[in-house]
Image: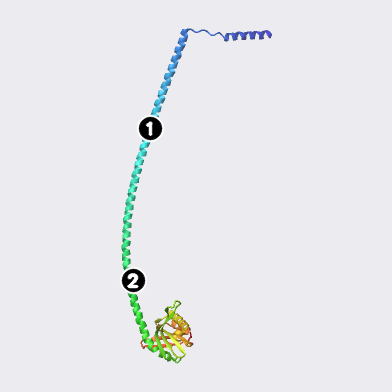
Amino acid sequence: MAVKKAAKKAAKKAAAKKAYLKPRRITAEELAAVLAETSKKMAENHAKTEAKMAENHARTEAKMAENHAKTEAAIERLSENHAKTEAKIAENHAKTEAMMAKSREKTDAAIESLVEQGKKMDAAVERMAANVEQLSRNIGHVNNDIGELVEFIVIPKIRLAMNATGKHSFDRMVAGRKYRVFDELGEKKPFTEVDVLLYSDAEVMAVETKSHLTTRYVRDHMERLEKLRRHEDLVGVKDKKLIGAVVGAIVDKGVKKFALERGLCVVTIREEEEKLDVAEPETCRSW
């Protein structure tokens, strides 16, 4: 066994020696051939590289040309769209201007129409005002005429009519009396006016005459009676009973009842007979 192992080691050593042979010297011719082959190989590789670079450059140029063409086309489309947009804006602007011009024309026409209507209305109002003023003058004139007619009938007959009731004995009368008093500044100012005053030794009757008697006139006369009592020395009713009467050519039932309930005599004019109908309350109120 030991012999076999020794033989194997010897064989391995011999094999190792064969594997590591000493390098062989090359000749100049062989070196030139190797250099020529290497240069040729490098030239071939350089040519291939140049060809590849040329091919890639051509492809790049083509791609850039293609992209440039696409960019130019896109720019052209944008220009066309911009031109269309500008045209649309100009068209819309023109339409808007036309609509505004038309609207201004309509507005101006409407304003002119309103101005014309205003002038007509002003003229109509002026005419109406003139008519109202004329009507007021006419009504005032008619009212004055009616009032004068009422007083013309009442004044000569009222004293006798009151005495005819058997409850009064008036022996004198004044009509259309206006009373004035001094105010705080010492100036004389009117405080009331009485259509008719009937006097006797014991009492005084203040009479108010209206063409159409109303509750407002009744209340006004009651206030008048209060004023007369406050200024009794001036009026001449001091120490005398002060009573009141209201007269009307037209006296509604409700107004008559209203006055009688407040202690006033109510006198109705019968125009067709020029007579006075006297209605007295159950008790004449004294102010």
The one of 99 and 175 positioned closer to us in this rendering: 175
Q: Dot 2 lies on which element?
A: helix
Residue 28 visible in image: yes
Q: In this rendering, is residue 186 above or below 5?
A: below
Residue 128: x and y in percent read: 33, 71
**C-beta proximity under 8 Å, tags 1 and 2:** no
Say which amino acid is labelled 2: Ala
Q: Earlier in the sequence, mark 1 or mark 2?
A: 1
Say which amino acid is labelled 1: His
| Residue wearing tag 2 | 129
Q: CA distance from mark 1 to mark 2?
A: 87 Å
The one of 246 and 25 positioned closer to us in this rendering: 246
Q: Name which residue lies at 32% across and 69% down.
A: 126
Residue 196: x and y in percent read: 41, 85
The residue at the far front in this view is: 186
Q: In this rendering, is residue 117 above or below 100?
A: below
Give me the disc on residue 244: none
